[in-house]
Image: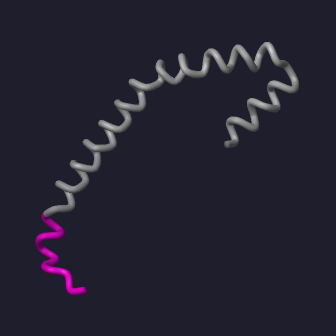
Amino acid sequence: MATFILWLLLFLVSWPLALLVLVLYPLVWLLLLPFRLVGIACEGVFSLLGGLLRLPGRLLKGPQRA
């Protein structure tokens, strides 16, 4: 919603620039998509490593009571 309001403000100030942004936005999104996928993969790897590092402590702590 905020992006749309910003685009409307840009449209009021300079409609040719707003139309250019409207055309280029999907292209920029497609260019940035591989970086998002790499970020998701790295987050998964770091979560896995964190879980593996904490596993011995969780095993030594014993079962949790609710």
**Vertical arrangement, residue 41 with respect to residue 32, above or below:** below
Q: Nearer the viewer, residue 8 or 31?
A: 8
Magenta stretch containing residue 62, yes or no?
Answer: yes
Coordinates of residue 33 in the picture (x, y in percent): 43, 26
In the picture, the quarter occupied by the C terminus is bottom left
Magenta stretch containing residue 38, yes or no?
Answer: no
**Residue under the point 22% across and 48% down:** 49
Q: Nearer the viewer, residue 23 or 61?
A: 23
**Residue under the point 16% across and 62% down:** 55
User: Does residue 62 appear to the left or right of 18 in the view shown?
Assistant: left
**Vertical arrangement, residue 59 with respect to residue 66, above or below:** above
User: Does residue 24 appear to the left or right of 58 in the view shown?
Assistant: right
**Vertical arrangement, residue 34 with respect to residue 40, above or below:** above
**Vertical arrangement, residue 28 with respect to residue 40, above or below:** above
Coordinates of residue 21 in the picture (x, y in percent): 68, 19
Q: What range of the chain is rendered magenta?
A: 56-66
**Residue under the point 19% across and 81% down:** 64
Coordinates of residue 62 in the picture (x, y in percent): 13, 79
User: Does residue 46 appear to the left or right of 39 in the view shown?
Assistant: left
